[in-house]
Each structure stands twice: as structure tokens, then as C-alpha cells.
Amino acid sequence: MNKAIIGKKLGMTQIFTPDGLVVPVTVVEAGPCKVVQVKTEGKEGYNSVVVAFDETKESRVNKAQMGTFKKANVSAHRILRELKLDNSQNYEIGTSILCDIFNEKDKVDVTGLTRGRGFTGVIQRWNQNRLKMTHGTGPVHREVGSMGANSSPSRVFKNKHLAGHYGHERVTIQNLEIVKVDSARNILLIKGCIPGPRGTVVTVSEAVKGVN
């Protein structure tokens, strides 16, 4: 991977092509990302770039992160992430990664956290059916139902679909297309939807599968 950037999901809208087709797009505020550390295969054993995104007050950053920012001579930022780039040696500390590293019609992978929905039952979490409303299945009709045989194996198998925490998972959607790049406003318009609600911090990187 040679190109990646950190951004913030601003929401969804639609644009019209010259042919009059409606294209749903997600608006992402991509960068600018300040390079605060460069890791190389010779020193750290792998190539990567540590970048900072979303400038904030120094009082909202812990001492360890502030030390990293001061060492790189960069102001405090809210987000600090590592991008595994094969060409990390081409970056210098203190420089900015901007959205213009991408072009229109580029294929990208977008990674983010999905919307958290708290503790949910099996119907909402796994799309299971409710129990019958008659024939003695009450009084609860949205419970899990049968858990398996009693005599053998006398236990519940691992990975059984049960109630629990739903959402707030790291998800990557692959091979999305960049419809427009607005360098003046640091905006990327990406065709389709990406993970998370508005305000989610996402990583936009070139597609690993290279689908045309």
C-alpha cells in the first residue's frame, strides 16, 4: 500500500453525472494529516508512517502523545494513527498528507467503526425469528429458544448466536470509487456508503485487491 489518509465522515449526499444519472456519495473530510514519525524496515523492521489528524488543544492530549508532537515540531492533534505504507521513506517528519494523493475514479478501501447499538437480543442482532404466539410458548416470544440437547453434549456450543453487544466493530468496505476530489476544502466524495455515523474517523487507503 502506497497511499492512505485519515478522514472524518461528514454525511451522505448525491451528485449528478453528465449523463443525468444520480450517484449517492459519502462526503469525507480527508486530512490534512501531519507526519509525526517515519518507521523503516531497517530500523523498526517494517515500513509505516505515524500521522496526526484533527488539531486540538494541548490540554486534551496526554503527556506521551504531546511528547511525540513536540519531537516532530507539530501542534497537538486529537487522532494519532499509524499507516503501513511501503514507500514510507518518501515522507518527511512535519510534512502534510493531503487528499490530492487520490484521483477521481481511484479504487479505495475505507475502514471505520460501525454504529454502536448496545446490548441487543437475538432478533435484532442476528435477524432470528420470534417464537410462536400460541401453543404454550409464552410469556416471552423474543427469547433465544432451544439451546441444544440436555443429555448430550450437555453444554452450549461456542459461537452460538446469542444476545450481546451489537455494533461498534471495525469494518472495512473494499473497492469503493472516488467520484470527486476537492483539494481546496480537503473533501473526498466516495461512491456509496462507508461504516459509522456522522463524525466517525475513517481510514481511506488504496484498494488492496486492485479491482478496475
Image (cartoon, rainbow, N blue to C red):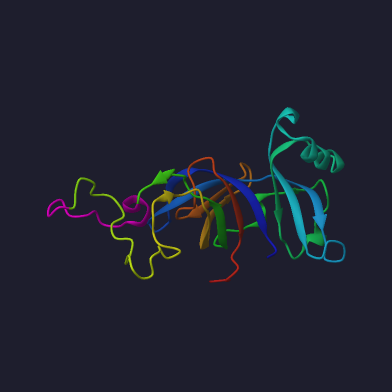
On the image, the x and y values in percent for residue 68 come to 81, 42
On the image, the x and y values in percent for residue 22 come to 38, 53
Which quadrant of the structure image shows residue 210? bottom right
On the image, the x and y values in percent for residue 158 come to 45, 64
Q: Is residue 104 left or right of residue 24?
A: right
Say if the magenta span includes residue 13.
no
Residue drawn at point x = 69 percent, y = 44 percent: 32
Give the main secondary structure of the magenta stretch: loop
Q: Residue furthest front?
A: 151
Residue drawn at point x = 33 percent, y = 61 percent: 147
Q: Quadrant of the N terminus?
A: bottom right
Say if the magenta span includes residue 134.
yes
Residue nearest the viewer, comparing 71 with 161 = 161
Q: Is residue 117 left or right of residue 134?
A: right
Q: Is residue 97 left or right of residue 148?
A: right
Q: Is residue 47 left or right of residue 195?
A: right
Which quadrant of the structure image shows residue 162? bottom left
Q: In this picture, which residue range is highlighted in magenta?
A: 122-136
Residue nearest the viewer, comparing 137 with 113 = 137
On the image, the x and y values in percent for residue 52 come to 72, 44
Evaluate whether residue 74 shows in this view.
Answer: no
Residue drawn at point x = 57 percent, y = 71 percent: 209
